[in-house]
Image (spheres, coloured by chain):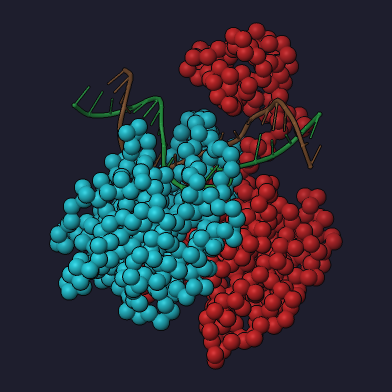
Chain colours: A red, B cyan, C green, D brown
Amino acid sequence: MARLQKAEQGSVWLDTILKGDCVAELEKLPSASVDVVFADPPYNLQLEGRLTRPDQSEVDAVTDDWDKFQSFAAYDDFTRAWLLACRRVLKRDGTLWVIGSYHNIFRVGAILQDLGFWVLNDIVWRKTNPMPNFRGRRFQNAHETMIWASRDADAKRYTFNYDALKAGNDDLQMRSDWLFPICTGGERLKGMDGRKVHPTQKPEALLQRVLTASSKPGDVVLDPFFGTGTTGAVAKRLGRHFVGVERETAYIEAAEARIAAVERTPDSALEMTSSKRALPRVPFNTLLDAGLIAPGAKLMDARARHEAEVRADGSLRAGSHTGSIHRVGALVQGLDACNGWTFWHVEQQGALAPIDTLRQVVRRDMEAAGV
Amino acid sequence: MARLQKAEQGSVWLDTILKGDCVAELEKLPSASVDVVFADPPYNLQLEGRLTRPDQSEVDAVTDDWDKFQSFAAYDDFTRAWLLACRRVLKRDGTLWVIGSYHNIFRVGAILQDLGFWVLNDIVWRKTNPMPNFRGRRFQNAHETMIWASRDADAKRYTFNYDALKAGNDDLQMRSDWLFPICTGGERLKGMDGRKVHPTQKPEALLQRVLTASSKPGDVVLDPFFGTGTTGAVAKRLGRHFVGVERETAYIEAAEARIAAVERTPDSALEMTSSKRALPRVPFNTLLDAGLIAPGAKLMDARARHEAEVRADGSLRAGSHTGSIHRVGALVQGLDACNGWTFWHVEQQGALAPIDTLRQVVRRDMEAAGV
DNA sequence: CAAGTCTCTGAATCATGCA
DNA sequence: GTGCATGATTCAGAGACTT
């Protein structure tokens, strides 16, 4: 929580919407200050002067003499500019999401690769209720594509809550194809006239999975194309901070009212299934110290094909092989690596139990002792 | 059939495999001579090191030289060259398919747009049985992407057999997300040594849908990266002509033997029967996404002896136990396994109802949506 | 023989904490 | 930053093998 407080103290821009062009507004943020970017950029190429080059000059609005090559180039300039601005404010181990359709996603993907982002996954949002194709000249366009990328190719410490996703998915790892309805019904923001406020409002369920997967409570989530604030609403509900950039006053007002009405989920429900990597390390000889295993005890694999002797210093011996539980486990099997905790077993009440169960005892005791 | 006869008379290259580099070989074909291109180019996977499964067995990766490129720029040059060569031999109203993964598909898509191709759809091939992510550091990569494009932006007369696809899809228009198994079992070509002949052989079902959708009997289908000839085998079976380009003699020999064994199917027998699907699996967090259960909600067993809290990620917590609905159900009962769907209940109108009833609601909605 | 169990494998950009 | 030891990590389907 130190991180949360630090973020709260120093940054007036936290949990606010900056009004203006995203490239210009992002210059006001310090570099390396956000954990996750979620971007839903315009898909349409005819942007009527909204496009700016990396040097902030405005790209000619191509309306009448519309030429597709010029237009692609303009869209590319625009894309490069906002991706670079996001890259500067992204932390070293932060990740970026972009959503798009076949009109723009290939260009966005190629450019972000060129800028040094490293694609981690492409994710397909399959729509349960897509718009039909009325002309019958193409396949029904029933999905959109998201790209999930780390800031750099060698970033390894990005946040990915693998175990949390798996626990919520019947103990199967989460796939790259997600199924959600489009945003309709009560969730869809409507104006006084009963018309939708924003043409491309994304469903909160989509953002909920994105943020559950790739952020932690207290993290800062940037949405450079904030629209009516789906990212902010979900971030607040999940106990994340947000910062948005949006040009249109009408969207900002709708987003602010919407986010104000969101209730933060209680901490106890926000707690995520933790990864085993995050659990405290327990050296094997702690089990000897705790008397859970005695020097000279015999360890076996699950089928009693291999046997090893526990030595007083917490190392194992199996024939001429000696070393750690992992090393000896690997050696007796002729493998490069082995998780000794799950490989080696002890006899308990006539049955073989993995020594990992003893480690769990130690961890429980540590927790009880407040260590 | 005039078209078919004309093609048969004048073209020695019809229904053959040209050996060599695809750009050079395609120069031997007349311009505007093929109706459909299906291209499965190298993905430029950029693999480093080795990957082992949790049991320490090694994954047989794509390490072939043909998939190695110096840089993105080199891959782009390669892509531009083969796309241009294909464009020249493609008829005015022809279409082109390319398949790829996130490693290469964005670059391919952007380049083909730059060259003047017009994207008609992007199609997602969802794999029923993808390789897992073994390190738990990303989402399981469970799909590949195909781009379907016409030669020019203003092409209107391309072939799309809308009604045939719809008739074979329970009278629903065909969506952009397709579900097929990867190529295994008897369909997978094996050498004398029992090893796969080609590392990336595509399933015939995939090509069958591609060619059924976008070609007519008698059409000419070009595959510039022919490999072991899936495109040729399916084309022959469906009464289309093929022409392939391939560099490796081993692949060509395997493809020729394979295609020789294919029998042309009578048109009447081409229709696929749609098999009844098993009930769709509904992950527990779908109930949260659908708003049927709120984070923080309490679940109980039928006699209210055990209680658990629903967390925002779709996992449960009961005391110190956390995990999936199944895992926590097992833990609170001290059992090895438990069907969380029938064990856990929610209070509804004063009575306890199993959460399985909520799953049925979701399934009904999914069915109504035609998913 | 049937049913259950074990083994193998597929386009993969697949660690991390501590000394 | 580097080096090294620790120890975390898989789903579906085919086919072989066992009881």
Query: Is residue A31 visible in the rendered structure shown here?
Result: yes
User: A151 and B276: which one is in front?
Assistant: A151
Image location of residue A166, percent across then percent down = 53, 45
User: A304 and B160: which one is in front?
Assistant: B160
User: B64 and B367: which one is in front?
Assistant: B64
Using the image, determine if residue A92 lies above or below residue A284.
below
Q: In which quadrant of the rendered view does residue A149 lie?
A: bottom right
Image location of residue A332, percent across then percent down = 56, 17
Q: Which residue shows up at 33% across the image and 62% down it? A: B222
Query: Is residue B363 visible in the rendered structure shown here?
Result: no
Residue at the outermost bottom position:
A64
Q: Which residue shows up at 52% across the image and 58% down it? A: B104
Image location of residue B227, percent across then percent down = 37, 50
Q: In which quadrant of the rendered view does residue A60 lie?
A: bottom right
Q: Which residue shows up at 32% across the image and 52% down it? A: B229
Q: Is residue B293 left or right of residue A297?
A: left
The quarter of the rendered structure image containing the C terminus of chain A is top right
Using the image, determine if residue A358 lies above or below residue A220.
above
Image location of residue B224, percent across then percent down = 38, 59
Using the image, determine if residue B98 lies above or below residue B315.
below
